Image (spheres, helix red, strand yellow):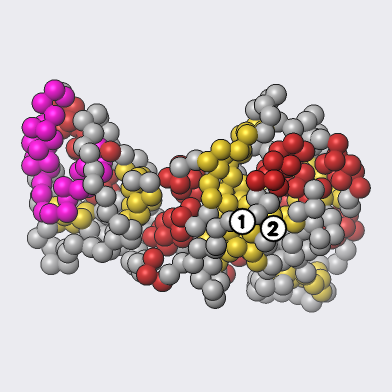
């Protein structure tokens, strides 16, 4: 084992303390081939993580981890360090928004593949590199709005990690590329580190062009089909992991992401065939880049974890001031005042939300809906209203109408006319 060293990555203040061997240092060089870093023998008082070799095992520890983790080989240890680096960046930049997924530059714009378990995003990235494209990430993509008001993705400079063994339908072109690149591997993964023409460097930026959701289907020729922006937004909300950011900010930025990009689903089996379809489809961007105006965003309210509303089942309630609302494809999303929650409202919950534009109590809401839908079970309607209103109260979406602070809020996005849904539905978080 070498002496204790300090590892510092460009753009990151916090450091990593290392007490490892040459095998770990070699893996580090390959995994971070395009993210500059320095190693020094000076001690560090601001290390956010430590990696040490103890009894032939690599120990990864951090005050931000629930417990220390141990690995038999350097590749898995570096892989865990990548995770800790992501969280360290979010702690240093709490307003940073990250998407969990891959991103590849095609003709000057990023095609983003939001993560779905074992959907093939890393092997597809490998195939796109083999076809001459530049990969920005295969794991997580920080976002920022640049000085021209364009939403951009930022490369981390971390090499693409491919699960082993390769799938049978990898394609000859991709397999040849895979075999020729510098790498470090173990039984589970290979990190591939091609030259800068195929992999973006740390902090390199490019505008978002499209969101493509992957679905592997055995024996299927590649098919690229448009999807609703609301479907894309729901998936992005689930994949976002910027939990340090205010939920209103997250909702605003993700809404802008789906509104300013093209949204698709790609079914595929053979990687080379899928890559050829992607490059043909995005061979030319016909629409200009959408700019994001500051007016598209309402300021995120300060997090409010105040006490629950007493006797809300009988109190006059109204929409809470400062709730952020986004409407995409006539689907409604809300961010509560607790700063953490993003909720999708189905038709039933949206109808109740519409009624809360003016002070109203639960018995009035129940009576209105029972009168509007006499064919429905009145007991079921009452229970649905209680469930939905309980969710609204719990996520700080409503306030007592007699509260001096209660006022009609200003919303993000335009409102739309709603057709009440008589079926039993409530808010979904």
Q: Considering depth in this image, is 81 or 206 the residue closer to the camera?
A: 206
Q: In the image, what residue occupies the spot 10% across and 26% down?
A: 374
Using residue 170 as the reference point, say whether residue 101 is left or right of it: left
Would you say the magenta stretch is mainly helix, strand or loop? helix
Query: Residue 285 shows which numbered tag?
Result: 1
Foreground pick, 148 / 46: 148
Please give the residue where the numbered disc 2 appears in the rendered image. 107
Query: How far apart are the alpha carbons under marks 1 and 2?
Result: 8 Å
Tell me if label 1 and label 2 are in contact, CB under 8 Å.
yes
- 357 within the magenta span: yes
Circle 2 residues within 10 Å: few <14, some 14–19, many ≥20 = some
Where residue 181 sits in the image (x, y, percent)? 88, 50
Q: Residue at x 50, y 40 (%)?
A: 227
Res 363 → quadrant: top left
Q: Is residue 141 visible?
A: no
Q: Is residue 127 above or below residue 222?
A: below
Which element type, helix, strand or loop, lies under badge 1?
loop
Quarter of the image with the N terminus in it: bottom right
Residue found 75% across the figure and 65% down from its top: 201
């Amino acid at each position: 084992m070498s002496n204790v060293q300090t590892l510092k990555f460009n753009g990151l203040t916090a450091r990593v303390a290392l007490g490892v061997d040459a095998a770990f240092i070699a893996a580090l060089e390959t995994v971070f081939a395009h993210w500059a870093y320095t190693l020094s023998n000076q001690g560090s008082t601001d290390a956010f993580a430590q990696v040490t070799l103890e009894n032939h095992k690599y120990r990864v520890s951090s005050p931000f981890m629930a417990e220390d983790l141990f690995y038999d080989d350097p590749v898995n240890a570096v892989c865990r360090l990548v995770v800790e680096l992501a969280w360290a960046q979010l702690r240093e930049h709490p307003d940073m928004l990250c998407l969990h997924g891959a991103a590849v530059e095609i003709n000057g714009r990023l095609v983003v593949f939001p993560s779905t378990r074992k959907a093939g995003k890393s092997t597809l990235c490998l195939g796109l590199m083999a076809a001459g494209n530049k990969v920005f990430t295969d794991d997580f993509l920080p976002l920022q709005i640049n000085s021209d008001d364009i939403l951009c993705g930022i490369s981390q400079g971390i090499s693409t990690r491919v699960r082993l063994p390769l799938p049978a339908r990898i394609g000859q072109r991709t397999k040849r590329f895979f075999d020729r690149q510098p790498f470090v591997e173990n039984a589970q993964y290979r990190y591939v580190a091609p030259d800068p023409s195929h992999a973006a460097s740390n902090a390199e930026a490019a505008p978002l062009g499209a969101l493509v959701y992957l679905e592997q289907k055995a024996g299927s020729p590649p098919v690229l089909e448009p999807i609703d922006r609301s479907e894309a937004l729901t998936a992005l909300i689930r994949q976002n992991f910027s939990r340090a950011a205010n939920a209103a900010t997250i909702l605003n930025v993700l809404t802008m992401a789906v509104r300013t990009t093209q949204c698709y689903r790609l079914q595929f089996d053979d990687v080379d065939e899928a890559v050829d379809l992607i490059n043909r489809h995005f061979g030319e961007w016909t629409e200009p880049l959408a700019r994001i105006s500051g007016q598209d965003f309402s300021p995120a309210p300060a997090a409010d974890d105040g006490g629950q509303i007493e006797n809300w089942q009988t109190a006059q309630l109204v929409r809470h001031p400062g709730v952020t609302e986004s409407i995409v494809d006539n689907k409604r999303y809300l961010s509560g005042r607790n700063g953490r929650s993003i909720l999708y409202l189905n038709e039933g919950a949206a109808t109740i939300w519409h009624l809360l534009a003016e002070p109203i109590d639960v018995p009035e809401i129940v009576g209105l809906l029972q009168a509007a839908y006499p064919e429905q079970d009145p007991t079921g309607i009452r229970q649905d209203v209680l469930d939905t209103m309980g969710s609204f109260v719990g996520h700080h979406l409503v306030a007592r109408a007699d509260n001096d602070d209660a006022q009609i809020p200003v919303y993000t996005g335009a409102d739309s006319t709603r057709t009440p849904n008589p079926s039993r539905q409530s808010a979904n978080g």
